[in-house]
Image (cartoon, rainbow, N blue to C red):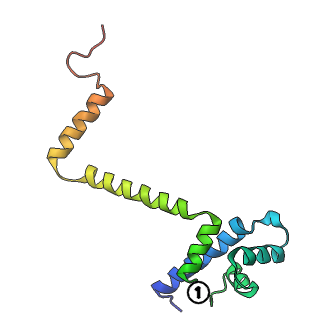
């Protein structure tokens, strides 16, 4: 039985939600699994059965966007996701600049790197 792309995305969201509940919202230090599920339900303001289904990543459950945002907010992972996307954007821009075929950029950039590194083989830079 093959899964569609949408089903795989939902599963990853469900796995994320389950993991966030288990590790961040109701960590093991809070006691038994039943106590942790009740604590997560109270924090999320969900019913115990809804929380239990997400906790155990029941494949019949689908996470709504507002529920996912609530989990991110309470678990404190929204900032990390934002930071990760910003870093990915910076890396993409750097790749585009460095891998570009524009020789007008590459030559001066490499010259600047050499100057910054103080390339010792340049004329007039030998030690005394």
Which residue is situated farthest in the left direction here? Answer: 104
The number of numbered discs placed on residues in the rendered structure image is 1
Which residue is situated farthest in the right direction here? Answer: 32
Quarter that holds the N terminus: bottom right
Can residue 16 be seen in this snapshot? no
Front-lying residue, 124 or 67: 67
Q: Position of residue 20 (x, y in %)?
A: 65, 69
Query: Going 20% across and 18% down the picture, which residue do you hit?
Result: 123
Above or below, comparing residue 119 to residue 127 in the picture: below
Q: Secondary structure at mark 1?
A: loop
Front-lying residue, 118 or 21: 21
Query: Going 76% across and 84% down the picture, which residue do you hit?
Result: 48
Q: Quadrant of residue 69?
A: bottom right
Query: Going 55% across and 79% down the picture, which residue do you hit?
Result: 66
Left or right of 97? Residue 76 is: right
Front-lying residue, 96 or 81: 81
Q: Quadrant of residue 47?
A: bottom right
Above or below, comparing residue 127 to residue 83 in the picture: above
Q: Position of residue 92 (x, y in %)?
A: 34, 57
Can residue 18 be seen in this snapshot? yes
* Label 1: few (<14), some (14–19) or many (≥20) C-alpha neighbours in 10 Å: some
Q: Position of residue 93 (x, y in %)?
A: 31, 55
Residue that mark 1 sits on: 62
Above or below, comparing residue 60 to residue 25 in the picture: below
Left or right of 125? Residue 56 is: right
Q: Position of residue 43 (x, y in %)?
A: 71, 73
Query: Going 62% across and 75% down the picture, which residue do you hit?
Result: 17
Above or below, comparing residue 59 to residue 69 in the picture: below
Quarter that holds the C terminus: top left
């Amino acid at each position: 039985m093959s899964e569609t792309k949408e089903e795989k995305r939902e599963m990853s969201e469900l796995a994320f939600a389950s993991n966030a509940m288990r590790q961040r919202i109701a960590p093991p230090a809070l006691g038994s699994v039943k106590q942790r599920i009740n604590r997560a339900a109270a924090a999320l303001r969900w019913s115990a059965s809804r929380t239990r289904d997400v906790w155990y990543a029941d494949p019949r459950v689908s996470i709504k966007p507002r529920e996912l945002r609530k989990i991110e907010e309470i678990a404190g992972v929204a900032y990390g996701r934002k930071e990760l996307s910003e870093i990915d954007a910076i890396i993409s821009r750097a790749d585009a600049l460095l891998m570009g075929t524009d020789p007008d950029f590459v030559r001066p950039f490499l010259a600047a790197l050499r100057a910054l590194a103080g390339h010792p083989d340049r004329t007039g830079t030998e030690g005394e």
